[in-house]
Amino acid sequence: MSSHLHQGNAVMPILFFKIILKTNLKILKIPNKFALKHGSGLSNPVFLKPPDGTRWKVCLSKKDDQVWFEKGWKEFTQNYSLDHGCLVLFKYEGTTSSQFDVIIIDDSDLEIDYSSYNGNDDDDDVSVQIVKEIHPYKKNKETMRGEKNVTTSLSLNRPREPRAREEANKFVSNNPFFTVLIKPPHITQYRLCIPVLEGYVDNEVKNVKLEYGDRSWPVKMLSCNKIYTNRFLSAGWNLFAQENELKPGDVCVFELVNMQDLVFKVHVVAAHHA
């Protein structure tokens, strides 16, 4: 039995896709044929729903039977690190809530791992694998005992975003650290997804300190559980972000400088705004 619904002469659901270009990362035009048939019936705003269960509110701009995703689209593309060559598949069921189910294909032609992106506050489920990378320019005592010129980075994550990965590769420290690209939800919401810190911090709720400049901020670190396979910086994070004027696109390196008292020195690499 077909699950398709009929709305007028149209058969539901309706599928369309858009290839992401540098020119549509901030505003995206909906296909004209879809806009002509269904544009007048769309609520404003609409909602984009990826498979991770999050819902993204996006406002529409309409002119002469043409429709664009505008306010909110940029935040969606930033959260999922969309870039030139990605593809987004939209499925419209014709519901009154004007929701589009979306699937994202990256430039490797594979659907992305949504769990690697920390978007909306209540739906984060970001599993970050701890890795040790061999890097010829980073030195610590453990590796220096054995081979010369072969050292181990104490990076606790491998960011997916190229710019954050670049900063992580450049960072030199004998202390463990992790790197995060700041995205819009990190500024407006009250927690930040971080690696599990296995082997360095017990899997319990902890009170930590974030040092930046000559000041420090107390922040609560949540533990992993059956729902979340990652950790979060929670109470206190929003104040830290606001008082230090963090902006989307900034890269933060969190260096664990005191393992006993759980003190992280934060290094901020500002975004390059045009």
Image: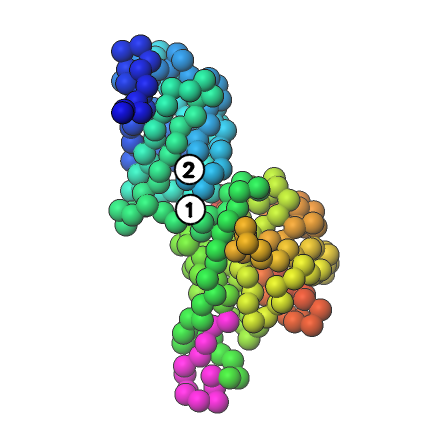
* Magenta stretch: includes residue 56: no
Magenta span contains residue 144: yes
Name the amino acid type tagged 1.
Answer: Tyr
Quarter of the picture containing the N terminus is top left
Amino acid type for the residue under numbered disc 2? Pro
Q: Check disc 1: other Cα within 10 Å, few if <14, some if 14-19, many if 20+.
A: some
Colour treatment of the image: rainbow
Q: Please report whichever mark, 1 or 2, sits nearer to the chain's N-terminal start.
A: 2
Q: In the image, is 149 to the left or to the right of 238?
A: left
Residue identified by numbered label 2: 50
Q: Quadrant of residue 28?
A: top left
User: What residue is rendered at 40% in x and 13% in y?
Assistant: 41
Q: Looking at the picture, tell me which residue is in the foreground, 34 or 215.
A: 34
**Measuring 58% from the left and 61% from the top, which residue is drawn there?**
254
Labels 1 & 2 near each other (Cβ < 8 A): yes
How many numbered marks have been drawn onto this rendered protein structure? 2
Magenta span: 143-154
User: Can you identify the residue that label 1 sits on?
Assistant: 114
Tell me if I can see residue 215 in this picture: yes
Report x, y in % for residue 8.
Answer: 31, 10
**Is residue 271 visible to the viewer in this orientation of the structure?**
no
Left-right relation of 231 to 29: right
Q: Residue 160's x, y, as percent?
A: 41, 54
Q: Circle 2 sits in a helix, a strand or a loop, which is it?
A: loop
Depth check, front residue: 211 or 60:
60
Instruction: Give the residue drawn at x 31%, y 43%.
Output: 105
Judged from the image, the secondary structure of the residue bearing numbered disc 1 is: helix
At 37% across and 34% down in the image, what residue appears?
Answer: 102
Q: Residues within 10 Å of mark 2 (few under 14, many from 20)?
A: some
